[in-house]
Amino acid sequence: MKIYVPLDSAAKALGADAVAEAIRDAAQAGGKDVQIVRNGSRGMIWLEPLVEIEHDDGVRLAYGPVSVADVPALLDGSAETLGPVEEIPFFARQTRLTFARCGVIDPLDIADYEAHGGLSGLRRAIAMTPADIVQEVTDSGLRGRGGAGFPTGIKWKTVHDTPAGQKYIICNADEGDSGTFADRMIMEGDPFTLIEGMAIAGLAVGATRGYVYLRSEYPVAIEVMNAAVEAARAAGMLGDDVLGSGRAFDMEIRVGAGAYVCGEETSLLNSLEGKRGVVRAKPPLPAIEGFLGRPTVVNNVISLATVPVIFERGAAHYADFGLGRSKGTTPVQIAGNVKYGGLFETAFGMPLRELIDDVAGGTASGRPVKAVQVGGPLGAYMPRSTFDTPFAYEEFDGQGGLIGHAGVVVFDDSVDMLKMARFAMEFCAVESCGKCTPCRIGAVRGVETIDRIAEGDADAPELLGDLCETMTDGSLCALGGLTPYPVMSALRHFPDDFARSREAAE
């Protein structure tokens, strides 16, 4: 009897470890032969801990949320099942490419990984020239999933074309946006796909060393990734002779202290070098002078974890999904006041309305949805009037929003948008690295100006607009440059919340 119990951080926070221990104890006491596999999460957080029992025909039936009290019924077969995992509506309507193995395999079993398509992409890449590898990524249309949406192929080509004795692949795993957890899920549930993607990137650009910069707040991901790197090295997936190719690539995990600004690539590089995590002025670009002054590919976890899919199935197959210049799929992370929160991988193009009202099931409170923030704490607040916008880069940009890391946080009609605008400015003030004046001083003045609006100052809204324009145009990085997105979108789309504050003050 094979039973899957997630080791994912969300599942563990909801009692998965206790459930796994109870299953083990009950099986021993009852003389049952039970194999417990600690898999990743399927992404349906409201059902965690989601336990799966594999039957002789290979079908895995789901049970959840499971508590310790439910364990006896699980083992004697009397527990009520949700049916096969793949038939749960939230899961069934997804297009799983990057996350196809997440929750399916044992995260640290390379044989299981390979049995589900792993390593086929790396083997194909080994047979290609570096230039052809870069071209395949370019043809796929893959764009950075960390926030900016920059074409991955262009970044790789720049590093490929820049001569140097040493080049690097850096994975940005400093996932700090509110409502985001895709990076963590893939590292905990399918770490070898990230390692494989980094190895392919190394072969493409001539880099022999790689680093994963992982935030300290992810202890499970740190543990799993370290174990996965050791297993990959032992299996010949990493080292001086990658899968017998005669080409070298090795990597290691580095842990950051948790500064939000270190999600910005140049701050990350400074931190990785042992320096203070502050933004670097550009140029030079990291692709020309990055880690230790050498040409460096800096990509997000999901970007690199998607590369093996592209090489396994072909660039044309991947590019066939999506909308316009937004190719492939995106792991939408649904959080906040929602009925069904979790990870939903879908092709770019699904309308925001369908994601919120249908997939997520509306609010958990049962009250109307008032606003949705997409793209983390720097993302714009989208009112219901914009919900027909397709989930894609250019389409969101046309509405004054951004996709960012595809985190979606939902608010019902009880939210005060003036307070949310103030929070955005306060967040920037707290997290600013202090390198540039528009961000360092502007955010502090922004909080003060919003407080003046709340106190009834009629001149403060215009001043806030001028301040936000200065921050957008003058900040060195996206922290100061994008903070005006949530602030001004709140002021523009929800003026009544700001007017009520002034009226109350008067």
Image (tube, rainbow, N blue to C red):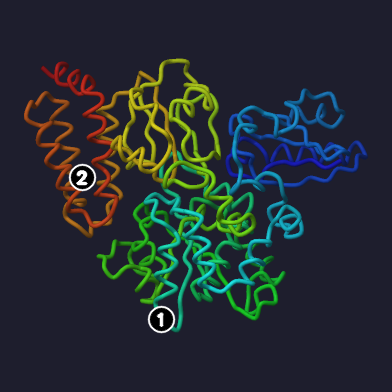
Q: Position of residue 373 (x, y in %)?
A: 37, 34
Q: What residue would you read off at disc 2?
A: 443
> How much space separates mark 1 and mark 2, taking CA atoms?
41 Å
Q: Position of residue 249 (x, y in %)?
A: 58, 74
Residue at 59% across / 62% down in the picture?
195
Q: Position of residue 281 (x, y in %)?
A: 25, 65
- Mark 1 and mark 2 in contact? Answer it, CB < 8 Å: no
Q: Is residue 223 visible?
A: no
Q: Is residue 251 left or right of residue 398?
A: right
Q: Is residue 42 above or below residue 238?
A: above
> Which mark is first along the chain, 2 or 1?
1
Q: Give the quadrant of the N terminus.
A: top right
| Camera-nearest residue between 27 and 144 | 144
Q: Residues within 10 Å of mark 1 (few under 14, many from 20)?
A: some
| Camera-nearest residue between 160 and 19 | 160
Looking at numbered disc 1 in the image, what kind of residue is underneath it? Answer: Pro
Q: Give the quadrant of the C terminus.
A: top left
Q: What residue would you read off at disc 1?
A: 163
Residue at 30% across / 34% down in the picture?
399
> Residue 92 appears in which quarter of the rendering?
top right
Q: Is residue 432 above or below residue 386?
A: below
